[in-house]
């Protein structure tokens, strides 16, 4: 057996370089995983924002429907008032006819 020689400087540098490359690769993998998680978080945030916009649109539509319903209710109230006035006018005509009939009866006697 020959003498055992110490590793050469080139061998040592090669080993250190390989170790550094392994560490760098591990860091890159960690960074890529973090970027993937951040991208997924952005996707979730965008989806939630879209859902919030849809909710706002739905609330606006519901508010518009409430306004329409209130307007229709007001129109219905106006219709009821108009019918009541027409009924009062008919009652007035009937009362006038009764008075005219009564006067005619008095005059005819």
Image (tube, rainbow, N blue to C red):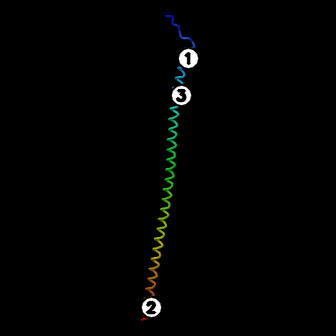
Mark 2–mark 1 Cα distance, whole angstroms, equals 133 Å
Local crowd size for mark 3, using a 10 Å CA cut-off: few (<14), some (14–19), many (≥20) = few
- Looking at the image, is 55 positioned above or below residue 70? above
As helix, strand or loop, the secondary structure at mark 2 comes to helix
**Which residue is found at the position 50% from the left and 63% from the top?**
71
- On the image, the x and y values in percent for residue 104 come to 44, 91
Residue in the image at 52% along x and 43% along y: 46
The correct choice, above or below, for 4 with respect to 79 in the image is above
Nearest the camera: 24 or 107? 24
**In front of the other: label 2 or label 3?**
3
> From the viewer's perspective, is the residue at label 3 or at label 1 nearer?
1
Q: Which mark is residue 104?
A: 2
Name the residue at 45% across, 87% down. 100
Within-10-Å neighbours for mark 1: few <14, some 14–19, many 20+: few
> What residue sits right under mark 1 in the picture?
14
Q: Are marks 3 and 1 in contact (CB under 8 Å)?
A: no
Disc 2 or 1, which lies upstream in sequence?
1
């Amino acid at each position: 057996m020959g003498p055992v020689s110490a590793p050469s400087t080139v061998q040592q540098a090669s080993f250190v370089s390989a170790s550094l490359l392994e560490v760098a690769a591990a860091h890159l993998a960690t960074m890529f995983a973090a970027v993937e998680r951040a991208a997924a978080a952005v996707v979730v945030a965008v989806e939630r924002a879209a859902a919030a916009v849809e909710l706002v649109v739905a609330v606006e539509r519901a508010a518009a429907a409430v306004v329409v319903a209130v307007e229709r209710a007001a129109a219905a109230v106006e219709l009821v008032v108009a019918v009541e006035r027409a009924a009062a006018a008919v009652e007035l005509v009937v009362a006038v006819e009764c008075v005219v009939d009564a006067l005619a009866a008095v005059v005819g006697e």
